[in-house]
Amino acid sequence: SSDVCSSDLMSWTEIVASQNASNNEGYITNLAGGVTLTLPVTASVGDVIRIAGKAGLWILAQNALQTVHFGNQDTTTGIGGTLTATHARNCVELVCTTANTDWDVLSSIGIIAKV
């Protein structure tokens, strides 16, 4: 059986500039000024994205029609919605629950702000 939380299922990339995320990838954010990582436009149910903060604050941005569900709270649907680290070492793991549009937070470390 495979474990979706197993680190051997995805690669990790250290990023020092804002960029678009890829499905089933992990990102280590390492820029004192912070980076913005934007969800993929297309995603299949079960795709996972992980962010591990190292330096600076990260922002997870969305595309049109996308929403992130964080427990009993949701981000603003579309490009205005974000999750934002409040500490450099905050981390989050998300899974796509509706193709292309809906992501659920599976786990987080630290206080993650939602817009």
Image (spheres, rainbow, N blue to C red):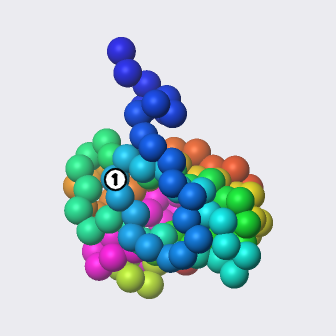
Q: Residues within 10 Å of mark 1 (few under 14, many from 20)?
A: many
Q: Return the x and y of residue 18 as percentages of the image width and height.
A: 50, 76
Residue beneath label 1, please? 23
Q: Is residue 69 magenta?
A: yes
Identify whether 79 is placed above or below 38. below
Quadrant including the N terminus = top left
Q: Is residue 82 magenta?
A: no
Residue 39, picture quadrant: bottom left
In this rendering, would 10 be left or right of 57?
A: left
Per the picture, the main secondary structure of the magenta-coloured stretch is: loop
Residue 14, picture quadrant: bottom right
Amino acid type at mark 1: Asn
Q: Which residues are magenta?
A: 62-76
**Which residue is found at the position 29% from the left and 79% from the top?**
64
In this rendering, would 29 be left or right of 80?
A: right
Instruction: Identify the element where label 1 is drawn.
Output: loop
Q: Residue 14 or 97: which is nearer the viewer?
A: 14
Q: Residue 60 or 104: which is nearer the viewer?
A: 60
In this rendering, would 59 be left or right of 10?
A: right
Confirm whether residue 104 shows in the render.
yes
**Which residue is found at the position 37% from the left and 47% from the top?**
24
Q: Return the x and y of residue 71 as percentages of the image width and height.
A: 54, 53
**Which residue is found at the position 66% from the left and 66% from the top?**
30
